[in-house]
Amino acid sequence: MLLYIGYGLAALCALFYSVLAYRRRGRLSIFAGNMFVSAAAVNITYLLRIHADTYTAASVTGSFYFVCLDLLVLAIFQYSVEFCVTRHSLSKEKRYIYLISSVVTAADCILLLSNILLGFVMDYRYEVYSIYVIKYMYVPGRIFYAHLVLVYLLAVGSAAAFLAKSVRVPAMYRGRYSNSLAVLLVLLLFTVGYMTGRIRIGADLSVIACGLLCPAVYRNTFDYTSKGMLNTTRKMILEYMGTPMILFDYDGYVADTNRDIRNLFPALNNPDQKLTMMDFMQIAAFKELQDTVTDQVFEWQNPGDIGDKVYQCDFRCLKDEKGRGIGHLLIMRSAVIERDSLTRLFTKQSFYENVVKLMKQQAYPITVVVCNTNGIGLINDVYGWAKGNETLRNTAKLLQDKLPKTAVIGRLEGGDMAAALPQAEQEYAVRLFQNIKDQYSAGDDLGIDADLEYGISVIRGDGTTVEDAVKEAIESMRTKKMMNESSQKSSLLDSLTQTLTESDYETEEHVERTKDMAVRLGKALHLSDAELGKLALLAVLHDIGKIAIPHSILLKPGKLTDEEWEIMKSHTEKGYRIASASKELQPIADYILHHHERWDGTGYPDGLAGQEIPLLSRIITVVDSHDVMVHDRPYHKAMCYEDAVEELKRCAGTQFDPDIVEVFLRVLEKDRHSGT
C-alpha cells in the first residue's frame, strides 16, 4: 500500500510542476514541462506494472513503461541541451540535435510497442519467490540491449552537457549546473544498480525519485539563488557601478568602499590603516559639508588628476526601523552627468533640483525665465544641424556671460533654456533679458531674422513648485512668440488679425495702439509676465468673434435693430469658441468672452459684475474704449483728450473698473507730459 501511495504522490508532484513550468511560456519552460510529464508517466506505468497479474498485462504495461522511460530520458537530454547551451548562435545546431534524438527515440518506442504482439525485444517470466514487487519480470532479448544503449547514450549526453557547463561558468554560478549533474548521476546510479541486481531492493526507487525531485529541478531551473553568488554579485555591483561610495559603521569607522572612491582617495587602499569618518573628512577636505549628523547634498571640487573635476556628494545618516543611527553612507556622483552635453548647462532634472535647493534656502523671490531662439528650426533646415547646435551653444554662453553668478541655468527640451534668479524681482529679470535679447539680435549674422524670446514667472514661497513656474514661463514665452514676426507661430495670429481688419473698422494702427497701451497699463498694475503676454494677445484678438458676424450688421452706418443688436452681441461667444478651438489661443478664451461685461453688471453675455469679471477683460475694456474715443470712426468723430478723460471718469464705477480707470488716467497723464 505504501508503494502505491509513494508512486502516486511522485506522479502528482511531477504533474503539478509540469503545469507550473508550462505556464511560464518559455522555450526552457516547455522542455522542463515535458520532462516533468514524462516523470509522471513513468511513475504511473510503474504502478501498472506492479499491479499486472497476467502475462498479457505484464507485456502491455512493461512495453509502455519502457516507452515512457525512453521519453523521460529523451526529455532530460533535450532539457539539458537547452539549459546548458544558451548561445543563440547555436540554435540551428540544437534543432538538429533535437530532431535526431527524437527520431531515434521514436524508432525505439515503436520497437518496444511492437513487442506486445511479437515478443522479440524481451520476454516475461513469473517469479513467485522473487524479492521484487513486480512478479512478471522481463527477460531481455538481443534487441533490448539496443534500447539500453540509446538510454545510456542520452543519459551520458545529459551528464556531459552539465559537466561541460559546470567547468566553463564562473565559480559563483557553478552550483546551478553541478546540482543538476548530481541529481542526474544519482538517478543513473540507482537505475543501473537496480537493473544489474547490485541494489537488492524490492522496488525501483529511482522511479519515485524522478517525481519527487521535480520541485528541486524546478527551483534550480527558474528560481535559483545562491547566497555566495548574491554576495559576490553585490560586491561586483558596488565595485563596477562607476560611482564612488564609502560606508561608515556605527562607531564611525570605514566599513566598506569601492574601487572608484579608493582611486580618488589612495589612503583607503591601505587595509592595515583603520580610518575613522573624521580622518576621511580631513583627507577629502569637504568644505561644504556642514556636519555629520544630518543628511546633506553638496558639491566637491576634485583637486587631483584622477576622476572628474566636480562631484555632487550625497551624505546620508543611516537608521534602523526604530530610527536609531547605524552608520553613514557617502555617494559621490559625477557632476558631469548633470550637464547637458551640447550647451554645458544643467540638464532639466539638475536644473529643477538646484532650484529646489534655492527654495529650501528661502532665496525668495526666485524669478524663473524660460527663453527660446526664434527660427532655430529654420536654421537647422537652411544651414544644417551643426549650425543649429552652434547657435544653441552661443545662446547658452550668452546667458552664462550676462546672468549673475548666482543664477541657475539649464537646458530644457529642444531649444528651451531656463534660468532661475534668486532674490530677484520680475522687473530685474526683464531688464536683464531685454539686454540679452538685444545683444542676441545684434549678433545675428545668418540673415534669417532670428531673435530670442522669453517668458517669466516668479516663485514667492506661496506653494508654487518649480514645475508650475517653468510651465507658466513657457506659456508666457509662447504667447509672446505668437506676436513676434520672426516666429513661425505668428502665422495663425497674422491670419486672424488680417481677417478681422478686413471685416470690421479695426485697423492695424488701432490694434498696435491698443496692444501697446494695454501692456503699459498692465505693467502699471504690476501684472506678471505671463499675464502681460496674455493681455497683449487679448488686445489683438478680443474682437475676433466679429469675423463671424454678417457684414450687413457689422458695417451698418445707422442704429441696429433689436434683432441685429442681439446678433452683434454674440461676437463675444463666437470669439470664445474660436479661441477655445486653438491650443495657442485657449489661455485668452475666457477673457474674450467677458470683455463686454460692465462693472455694474449690465453687460453681456453673462451679466458679471465687479471683481467677477476677469481682470484682463476689465483692462482691455478700458483701453479699447479709450482708443475708440480719441480716434475717428465712420460713425463718430474723435474726442479731444479732456473730453475722453471726462468720459472715462463718468463711466468709472458703471461701465469700467474705477481702480483701473484711476491707474489708466495716471498713465495717460504721464504720456501727455512726456509728449508720447
Image: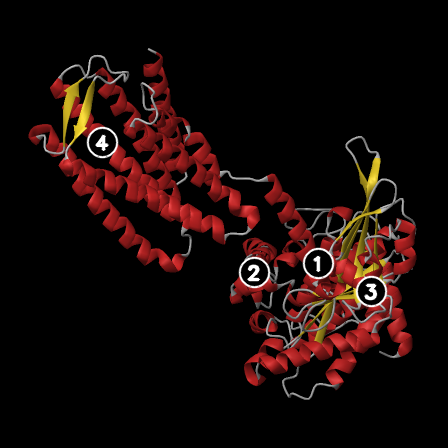
- Give the residue at mark 4: 66
Circles 3 and 4: CB distance less than 8 Å? Answer: no
- Give the residue at mark 3: 523
Residue 398 found in image quarter: bottom right
Give the secondary structure at mark 4.
Answer: helix
* Whole-number angstrom distance, CA of label 1 to CA of label 4: 67 Å
Decide which of 261, 408 is in the foreground and name it: 261
Residue placed farthest to the front in the image? 198
- Give the residue at mark 1: 349
Q: Quadrant of the image for the C terminus?
A: bottom right
Going from N to C along the chain, the mark reached first, 1 or 4, is 4
Residue 221: image location, x then y, percent: 45, 40
- Give the residue at mark 2: 582
Decide which of 269, 321 is in the foreground and name it: 269
Hey, what amino acid is under mark 3? Answer: Lys
Residue 53: image location, x then y, percent: 17, 14
Total labels: the figure holds 4
Going from N to C along the chain, the mark reached first, 3 or 4, is 4
Hey, what amino acid is under mark 2? Answer: Ser
Q: Is residue 95 left or right of residue 424?
A: left
* Whole-number angstrom distance, CA of label 2 to CA of label 3: 27 Å
Residue 102: image location, x then y, percent: 24, 45
* Whole-number angstrom distance, CA of label 3 to CA of label 1: 33 Å
Residue 632 seen by the camera: no
Going from N to C along the chain, the mark reached first, 2 or 3, is 3
Decide which of 59, 143 is in the foreground and name it: 143
